[in-house]
Image: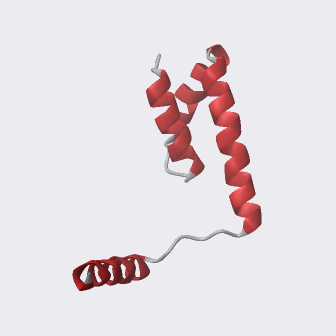
Amino acid sequence: MKISCKEAANICDKSQYKEAGFWDIVKLRVHILFCKVCKGYSKTNTELTSLCDRAGLTMLSEDDKKKMERDLKDKELQK
C-alpha cells in the first residue's frame, strides 16, 4: 500500500480532475499522513482547484483545440 511521492503527486493531480479511483485516493490519504511535502502539495492543489472553480474557468473543446493547432501550423508555414 506504500506509494512514492511521485505516485502520490500523480494521484493528487488525477483527483483534482475527478479521475482518481477510490483505492488511489485511499493510498494518497495514507501517504499524506506521513509525508509533509505531499501534504503541502495536496493542499496547494486543492486551493488551486477551488480558485479555478470559483473563477469559472473552462477548457477548450476538442474542435477548438484542433482549429487552434491548424491556425498555428498555417502561420508557421507563412513565415
Residue 65 is drawn in which quadrant? bottom left
- Left or right: residue 36 compared with residue 64: right
Q: Residue furthest front?
A: 79
Q: Nearer the viewer, residue 22 or 29?
A: 29
- Picture layout, residue 68 above or below residue 51: below
Q: Nearer the viewer, residue 64 or 12?
A: 64
Residue 23 can be seen, yes or no: no
Q: Residue at x 57, y 20 (%)?
A: 31
Q: Residue furthest left?
A: 77
Q: Residue at x 71, y 70 (%)?
A: 56
Display coloring: secondary structure
Could you say where residue 71 lies in the image, as x and y percent from the top left? 34, 84
Residue 42 is drawn in which quadrant? top right
Could you say where residue 79 lies in the image, as x and y percent from the top left? 26, 81
State the count of labels.
0
- Left or right: residue 22 compared with residue 70: right
Q: Nearer the viewer, residue 64 or 32?
A: 64
Q: Residue furthest right?
A: 54
Could you say where residue 1 lies in the image, as x and y percent from the top left? 46, 18
Could you say where residue 38 lies in the image, as x and y percent from the top left? 60, 26
- Picture layout, residue 41 above or below residue 2: below
Residue 3 can be seen, yes or no: yes
- Left or right: residue 71 compared with residue 77: right
Q: Residue at x 53, y 43 (%)?
A: 13
